[in-house]
């Protein structure tokens, strides 16, 4: 068990290092550097030189990578070029806001998806399954920027039930942000739930036909008990890793959804940073997204490990 | 009796509540969005390169502003007169004007504001515009004398610049105290900025109680906020306009503005060093059709290759219909009877920049001008293509004198067509030294006529600006933001 655990954590660390190297050196391959890109059309030689020294760009790349990565480990994400403030301070609030949005999305979306998936899987090809699976396929194929815009059009512009675009600031109290995240969360849930429920449905169908479920039914165990004690626990296990993957997808989804709804989170900040040519901030956000992705998957792995005794031993 | 007493007791808090509620309702607030174009480093310093333009226009005042015809009109300066050589300008100031902090506006503030424009530490783009101000003398509290290092008869026009706004003497970061109709209550360009009415405003208290700004960087999100009634005032792009057509809740305005696309042909490279060829490349264009194709009917004004906007008093209003026969004749004279091959570069930097070149390519083909169009990568376009090749270019509005010098004077840094004409340069020098505004106008017009005859830059039209407002907003005419008198803007119930 400990060996497996260490192996997973070790793999996560290696992945992180690779991400850091790619994020850092991709920038080295780009034409120009952070200074020339940020200063743009009006950059004079003296301004460029001053900027190079300020950002340490006069140092060799490998040395800069080591310093940058070392600073990152100590929680120092550097200074934003455009905003001229520590990146940790800028990113902190946005990270909280994105976590609130992701939290609202998963607290509502995951149970909903699991419930609908089980419901659809228990009566495969029945009218209920057809309805649920049909809507799910539709949800998966419509991109977020369309479903988000439609949500605003229907619920804000036509019906007037909810504010369409988030107009509160990034430092607003958490409770306000929870209220503001209704429509953006609904947009994310629409897609997230579709992915998870299809997985759960397939898994339930499979387990229902498995030997042990057949056996239980032949023994005369009541259907309700078969479902709750034999089928659901076994069917949900594979769902855990898909939930982990979907949560990681959520991070990409928030970039679009936060822009559509003007939600003051990390995704919108990423778009703004790219638009402002603020490369140190773009780097920090990319690395942070990578970190969250790895941690989420590691978490999902560990939960699956705890719930499934068979995974705990190493097989050759 | 008992009944009525208890009714009264009950009723009193209700009445108070209702009064409070109606008082809250009566507060008139205009909600706007700021586009966060500087990513949160928006500055309240009016001459900063990162100036928070949406807000600065409301909290500060200029010395001189434009009247409805674009001519200089008094704001904080009541009168301005020059000496005979236009090297010294004397301004008398509006008495009784106070800053938001209660201090009185006087000549020392003018001295402070105008002299800091030259401070190299501020790296202000306004230095290029007003750097010729040598010093400002305080004659008395209401009289200031501006001394120039070179004669400039057009100083009043340059003082109309939307950035040259008065600060109190000794103002320092973060700034924010001005003499404008609104004062700053809270400032956070990344979330909300709230302004309230300056009741002591010298032209009268504003009709609005508050103006609130919410940061919405994404253009589509701003549009959604407008459609959903979350903001009352917003800029509008051409493709968003149909969303509001015929909707009684909104007012859409289209107004003359000074931005344009153009094609800068390299006048110093053969065969384009022949002015006849340059003229042929320009007169073969059907500008009316191009304007209609690019912006829709009535959303711009045809330009005969002048960069100057329609509301500028110095604009040359020439006539330049498409002239295919004339273009062919000019090409034949220059030794190209069978037409000419020209390479033009563009990039997808702004919506319309590629289409502009495509429309050009189609239109001039009739005159035997064969355009090889290359869409270059957006990254590095200004470094690698612009100023070096025949390239589609994009400019925002500037006053006539600034435009004609910055983009066409021999050797100017941003002379993108490498146009060099001694007669043209002389006309600009003369215009700068001519105090009579009508005489100055005729000199600037002559300079623009030279551009149409020999210049290397095609400018087919200036596109209008557009805005959309809640139909409750009153007091905003279809004119550029610079013209809005914000203290007269209100919200109808």
Image (cartoon, coloured by chain):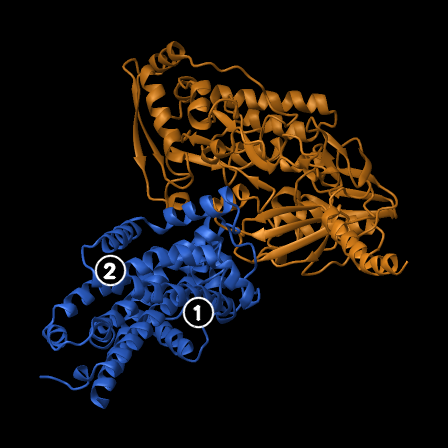
Residue A159: percent from left, percent from top = 50, 44
Front-most of residues B223 and B484:
B223
| Farthest residue, direction bottom | A2
- Secondary structure, mark 1, is loop
**Left or right of B46: which side holds A100?**
left
Instruction: Report the residue at 59% width, 25% height from top.
Output: B310
Subunit bearing disc 1 = A
**Residue B218, can we see it?**
yes
Question: Which quadrant is the C terminus of chain B positioned in?
Answer: top right
Instruction: Report the residue at 32% width, 60% height from top.
Output: A193
Q: Mark 2 points at which residue?
A: A120
Q: Residue B262's quadrant in the figure?
A: top left
Q: Is residue B93 depicted above or below B331 in this figure?
A: below
Q: Name the residue under label 1.
A: A56
**Residue A272, can we see it?**
no
Among the chains pictured, the one given orange colouring is B
Instruction: Report the residue at 57% width, 36% height from top.
Output: B468
Residue B201: percent from left, percent from top = 81, 45
Label whose residue precedes the other's in the sequence (2 or 1): 1
Q: Is residue A301 depicted above or below B140 in this figure?
A: below
Subunit bearing disc 2 = A
- Within 10 Å of disc 2 (Cα), the crowding (few <14, some 14-19, many 20+) is many
> According to the rendering, which colour does chain A have?
blue
Question: Which quadrant is the N terminus of chain B positioned in?
Answer: bottom right
Front-most of residues B429 and A74:
A74
Q: Is residue A226 depicted above or below A152 in this figure?
A: below
Residue A307: percent from left, percent from top = 25, 81
Q: Nearer the viewer, mark 2 or mark 1?
A: 2
């Amino acid at each position: 068990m400990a060996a497996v655990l260490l192996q997973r954590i070790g793999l996560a660390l290696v992945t992180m290092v690779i991400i850091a190297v790619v994020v850092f050196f991709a920038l080295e391959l780009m034409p120009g550097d952070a200074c020339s890109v940020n200063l743009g059309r009006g950059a004079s030689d003296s301004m460029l030189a001053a900027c190079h020294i300020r950002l340490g760009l006069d140092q060799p790349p490998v040395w800069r990578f080591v310093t940058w990565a070392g600073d990152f480990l100590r929680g120092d994400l550097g200074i934003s070029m455009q905003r001229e403030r520590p990146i940790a301070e800028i990113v902190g609030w946005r990270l909280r806001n994105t976590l609130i949005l992701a939290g609202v999305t998963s607290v509502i979306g995951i149970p909903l998806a699991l419930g609908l998936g089980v419901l659809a899987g228990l009566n495969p090809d029945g009218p209920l399954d057809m309805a649920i699976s049909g809507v799910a396929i539709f949800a998966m194929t419509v991109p977020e920027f369309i479903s988000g815009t439609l949500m605003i059009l229907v619920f804000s512009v036509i019906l007037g039930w909810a504010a369409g675009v988030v107009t509160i600031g990034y430092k607003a109290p958490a409770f306000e942000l929870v209220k503001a995240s209704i429509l953006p969360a609904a947009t994310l849930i629409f897609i997230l739930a579709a992915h998870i429920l299809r997985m759960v449905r397939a898994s339930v169908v499979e387990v229902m036909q498995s030997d042990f479920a057949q056996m239980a039914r032949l023994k005369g165990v009541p259907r309700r008990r078969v479902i709750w004690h034999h089928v659901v626990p076994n069917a949900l296990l594979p769902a855990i890793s898909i939930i982990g993957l979907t949560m990681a997808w959520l991070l990409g989804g928030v970039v679009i959804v936060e822009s559509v709804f003007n939600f003051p989170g990390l995704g919108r900040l990423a778009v703004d940073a790219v638009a402002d040519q603020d490369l140190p901030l773009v780097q920090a956000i990319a690395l942070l997204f990578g970190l969250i992705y790895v941690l989420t998957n590691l978490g999902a792995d560990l939960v699956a490990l705890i719930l499934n005794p068979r995974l705990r031993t190493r097989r050759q | 009796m008992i009944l009525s007493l208890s009714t009264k007791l009950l009723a009193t808090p209700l009445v108070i509540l209702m009064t409070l509620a109606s008082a809250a309702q009566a507060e008139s607030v205009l909600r706007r969005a700021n586009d966060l174009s500087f990513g949160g480093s928006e500055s309240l310093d009016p001459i900063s390169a990162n100036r928070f333009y949406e807000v600065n226009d409301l909290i500060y005042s200029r010395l001189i502003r434009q009247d409805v015809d674009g001519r200089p009109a008094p704001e904080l300066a009541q009168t301005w007169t020059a000496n005979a050589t236009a090297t010294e300008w004397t301004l008398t100031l509006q008495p009784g004007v106070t800053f938001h902090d209660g201090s009185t506006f006087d000549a020392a503030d003018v001295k402070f504001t105008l002299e800091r424009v030259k401070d190299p530490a501020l790296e202000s783009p306004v230095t290029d515009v007003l750097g010729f101000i040598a010093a400002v003398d305080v004659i008395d509290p209401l009289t200031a004398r501006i001394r120039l290092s070179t004669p400039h008869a057009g100083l009043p026009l340059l003082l109309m610049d939307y950035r040259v706004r008065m600060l109190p003497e000794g103002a320092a970061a973060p700034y924010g105290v001005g003499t404008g109709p609104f004062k700053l209550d809270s400032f956070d360009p990344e979330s909300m900025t709230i302004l309230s009415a300056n009741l002591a405003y010298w032209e009268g208290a504003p009709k609005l109680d508050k103006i609130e700004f919410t940061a919405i960087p994404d253009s589509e999100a701003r549009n959604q906020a407008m459609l959903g009634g979350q903001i009352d005032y917003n800029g509008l792009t051409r493709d968003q306009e149909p969303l509001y057509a015929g909707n009684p809740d909104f007012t859409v305005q289209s107004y003359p503005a000074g931005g344009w696309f153009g094609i800068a042909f390299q006048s110093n490279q053969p065969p384009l060093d022949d002015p006849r060829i340059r003229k042929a490349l320009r007169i073969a264009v059907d500008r009316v059709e191009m304007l209609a194709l690019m912006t829709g009917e009535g959303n711009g004004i045809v330009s005969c290759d002048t960069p100057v906007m329609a509301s500028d008093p110095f604009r040359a209003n020439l006539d330049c219909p498409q002239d295919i026969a004339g273009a062919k004749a000019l090409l034949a004279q220059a030794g190209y009877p069978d037409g000419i091959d020209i390479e033009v570069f563009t990039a997808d930097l702004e919506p319309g920049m590629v289409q502009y070149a495509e429309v050009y390519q189609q239109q001039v083909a009739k005159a035997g001008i064969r355009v090889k169009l290359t869409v270059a990568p957006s990254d590095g376009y200004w470094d690698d293509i612009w100023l070096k090749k025949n390239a589609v270019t994009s400019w925002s509005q500037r006053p006539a004198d600034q435009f004609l010098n910055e983009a066409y004077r021999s050797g100017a840094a941003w002379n993108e067509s490498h146009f060099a004409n001694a007669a043209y340069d002389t006309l600009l020098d003369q215009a700068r030294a001519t105090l009579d505004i009508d005489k100055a106008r005729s000199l600037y017009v002559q300079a623009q006529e030279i551009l149409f005859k020999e210049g290397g830059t095609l400018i087919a039209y200036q596109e209008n600006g557009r805005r959309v407002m809640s139909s409750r907003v009153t007091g905003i005419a279809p004119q550029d933001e610079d013209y809005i008198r914000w203290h007269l803007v209100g919200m109808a119930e």
